[in-house]
């Protein structure tokens, strides 16, 4: 892929690395490439100054939400190099999202090249303070104007970057999770396994409800029977029940998280018994009640790990591990962040160091 | 609501009324109003020249699809006046959509006023040829830039207009319907009853599949059991089984169509037995097989009525009424379009004539 680079005339001041927040600042440039059916597909890959888009009010993305996105990070390792974590996993997941939404997609190679080039151009934006990184947001949307409902004939794929601190400003600390039994996120035959915008818009209501009750995040049940535990708002979730790690399978309704896959690999490498299976919420609550549930944690790129300190379901509250971060949760966090930030050896070949 | 009007300096040429299509031309002006949490809500209602929007690439609508829309029409009656059809129904439905998506909403009064004012300003755009009208597209989306998943703190509500001809260029003629048993549109606890973008993006794949098999539209089954008939891509659907009209109830998964409600009212007024009930697809196919299914038709603002000439389900094809528009379907079409275009008396008080 040939990428034209047009540099910004003036650069923005870099923000204070100790108060980055999550998505408050965007870098000086963005990557953009267009897809037009009548121009033979992808064309005009470019890195240009970050600037507003000109969008016709009839543009289909504003009406029919034909849009997908990804999320990954660039890290500064102790040698001062810049590294990505399994970017090809995001490339492939976006392909799967786009296929479900009848959208064209970039090849794995072009996706990774686009990410890499933009990060290289913006490498001065990668923060160096502990636990900070450069969050990478590739996204794509229907850019055709029109009110008829059909797959668009033109699209824009864009990448923007934002330097981020810890997702939870207070640091890694247990969160309270609300198990939702009314609203539904995903159902077999739907879009649950994709990162499409609609999944997130539809999930806001339950999130609002959870917060009203003093909970941080929603744990979704399957949409068909509301019986099995699936995932959290923007994380997969794992449970240490006795000495087995249990997590929902990725069979169409759950997003196949890169962090999830990486943690399962590490756990298996450590010899843990890992079960990817449908876990009934009744079994989970019973395990929490009896103490068989030793630890629980959410996994996702943004927060890496969120220890779960409490579960709420239909009027019942169960505290897990005295509302403290458990030893396995902590060890997983240290190991995965160690690999991501380059403090530990890249045993599984997950790191792509940029030149 | 105070609406500032800024007129376009030059007006576009009006398109040929015999080749309007659906959504090919947009008028000279649009309505726009902003909602900002930190400015106390709605402000700055205005009718301005139709022009591209400036949208930051981080704008939440492009990532998380917090967006809803509506669709209604303005008609030119035989006296040359301009009239709307039940616009308050669209206002209320948009309120329900927005509540589900954690978005603020306009009052019924402001919604209808905004639609009316814009249509008045653009009345020269309302075509007069038979079966033509001015399609009105109100829509609203999260305009806050940010990559965190939460309800936005700022929104834009916009109305655009497009003169339209017959939705089906060939005129009212029976369509072939594919009953989908793999992909799912909506599930209890989801967003099925709303006009949110995500519902439409998620439905494209099945539509594509139906078209590949030579069918025009998809008929969705309920997402939980894939057992009951719900609605078509952008229409509700009704069946005349023996002498009873059967249609799905609107209990959370089906969009409560304005056309649906109007037709049920007309049918009841005519003394028909109308059942809003869960109709098993097996019962429907059996009725089609035995000939108990006399007629079937889709209902929606865009096409008004689409007679259904054939149903496909799991390998079986059933032709309905010899693939001809049935007498009840035709009578409903004539009656409803008669009221909408002002050729028949407004018996139910559905028409709002603009000054
Ligand atoms: C719904 C959902 N589940 C799970 C995840 C975790 O995926 P990953 O580990 O790839 O960030 C995310 C975040 O990307 C998400 O949005
Ligand atoms: C999914 C869906 N169902 C039904 C309808 C019909 O609704 P109405 O009659 O209000 O146009 C529409 C179109 O608006 C729709 O998009």
Image: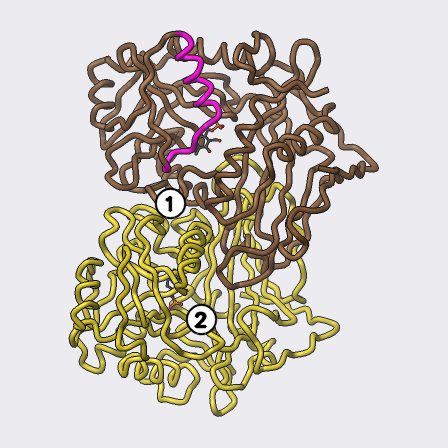
Chain colours: A yellow, B brown
Provide the residue span drawn in magenta: B252-270
Q: Residue A302 has which mark? A: 2
- Disc 2 under 8 Å from ligand 1? The reply is yes
Left or right: where B170 falls relative to A284: right
- Residue where numbered disc 1 is placed: B190
Dot 1 crowding, Cα within 10 Å, few <14, some 14–19, many 20+: many
The quarter of the image that holds ligand 1 is: bottom left
Assign a secondary structure to mark 2.
Answer: loop
Q: Is residue A98 above or below residue A306?
A: above
Q: Is residue A125 above or below residue A192?
A: below
Assign a secondary structure to mark 1.
Answer: loop
Circles 1, 2 touching at the beta carbon (< 8 Å):
no
The residue drawn where x is 32% and y is 82% is A330
Q: Quarter of the image holding residue B284?
A: top left
Q: Residue A87 has which mark? A: none
Disc 1 sits on a residue from what chain? Answer: B
């Amino acid at each position: 892929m040939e990428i034209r680079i047009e540099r910004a005339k003036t650069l923005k001041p870099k923000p204070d690395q100790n108060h980055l927040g999550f998505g408050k600042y965007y870098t000086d440039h963005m990557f953009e490439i267009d897809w037009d059916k009548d121009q033979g597909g992808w064309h005009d890959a470019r890195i240009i100054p970050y600037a507003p888009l000109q969008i016709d009010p009839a543009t289909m993305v504003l009406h029919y939400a034909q849009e997908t996105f990804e999320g990954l990070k660039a890290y500064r390792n102790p040698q001062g190099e810049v590294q990505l974590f399994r970017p090809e996993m995001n490339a492939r997941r976006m392909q799967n999202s786009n296929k479900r939404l009848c959208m064209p997609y970039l090849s794995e190679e072009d996706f990774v090249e686009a990410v890499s080039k933009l990060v290289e151009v913006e490498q001065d934006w990668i923060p160096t303070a502990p636990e900070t990184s450069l969050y990478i947001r590739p996204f794509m949307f229907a850019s055709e104007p029109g009110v008829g409902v059909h797959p668009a004939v033109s699209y824009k794929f864009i990448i923007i970057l934002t330097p981020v601190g810890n997702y939870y400003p207070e640091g890694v600390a247990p969160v309270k999770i609300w198990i939702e039994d009314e609203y539904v996120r995903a159902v077999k035959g739907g879009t649950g396994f994709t990162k499409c915008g609609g999944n997130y818009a539809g999930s806001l209501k339950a999130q609002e409800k959870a917060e009203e009750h003093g909970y941080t995040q929603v744990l979704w049940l399957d949409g068909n029977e509301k019986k099995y535990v699936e995932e959290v708002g923007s994380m997969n979730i794992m449970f240490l029940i006795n000495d087995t790690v249990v997590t929902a399978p990725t069979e169409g309704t759950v997003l196949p998280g890169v962090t999830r896959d990486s943690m399962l690999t590490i756990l298996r490498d450590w010899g843990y018994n890992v079960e990817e299976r449908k876990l009934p919420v009744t079994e989970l609550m019973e395990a929490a009640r009896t103490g068989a549930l030793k630890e629980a944690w959410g996994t996702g790129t943004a927060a890496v790990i969120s220890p779960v300190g409490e579960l709420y379901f239909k009027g019942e509250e169960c505290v897990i591990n005295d509302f403290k971060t458990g030893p396995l949760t902590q060890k997983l966090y240290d190991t995965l962040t160690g690999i991501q930030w380059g403090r530990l050896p890249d045993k599984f070949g997950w790191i792509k160091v940029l030149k």
